[in-house]
Amino acid sequence: MTGVLEILGKRVREKREELGLSQEALADVCSFDRTYVSLIERGKRNISLVNLVRIAIGLNTSVSQLTEGIEDGSYPKR
């Protein structure tokens, strides 16, 4: 499962950087602590569905885009 969390974290980080947001700015939008965002991006936290939805909203994307192909470890080209 660690690989899945790392892929998700990588996608969150890439989307956040694409939007020009700092970890702190994303955390503020999602009502999280900045360290929680850092843990997610490093694949160290197994987040709840509710928090995944909050992140997707904060990144102006969908849960499905963040998780596409994640079950088989693939990383679709964007």
Image (cartoon, helix red, strand yellow):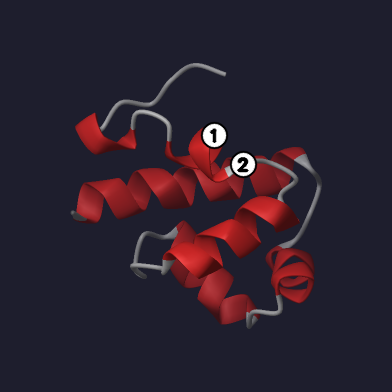
With 65 as the anchor, is 19 left or right in this view?
right
User: Considering the numbered disc 1 on the image, is that residue within a helix, a strand or a loop?
Assistant: helix
Closer-to-camera residue (22/59): 59
Pointer 1: residues within 10 angstroms few (<14), some, or many (20+)? few
Residue 12 point in image, percent of width and height = 56, 49
Residue placed at 37% from the left, 43% from the top?
7
Pointer 2: residues within 10 angstroms few (<14), some, or many (20+)? some
Q: Quadrant of the C terminus?
A: top right
With 21 as the anchor, is 35 left or right in this view?
left
Residue 22 point in image, percent of width and height = 75, 61
Residue placed at 73% from the left, 57% from the top?
58
**Residue reaching furthest top?**
77
The residue carrying mark 2 is: 62
User: Considering the numbered disc 2 on the image, is that residue within a helix, a strand or a loop?
Assistant: loop
Q: Is residue 36 above or below residue 6?
A: below
Q: Is residue 57 above or below residue 39?
A: above
With 30 as the anchor, is 62 left or right in this view?
left
Q: Quadrant of the N terminus?
A: bottom left
Q: Is residue 16 above or below residue 46?
A: above
Residue 65: numbered disc: 1
Residue placed at 63% from the left, 63% from the top?
54
Distance from label 2 to label 1 (Cα)?
A: 5 Å
Residue 29 point in image, percent of width and height = 78, 69
Disc 2 marks a residue whose amino acid type is: Ser
Label 2–label 1 contact, CB within 8 A: yes
**Residue reaching furthest bottom?**
33
Residue 8 point in image, percent of width and height = 42, 47
Residue placed at 38% from the left, 26% from the top?
75
Q: Is residue 73 above or below residue 30?
A: above
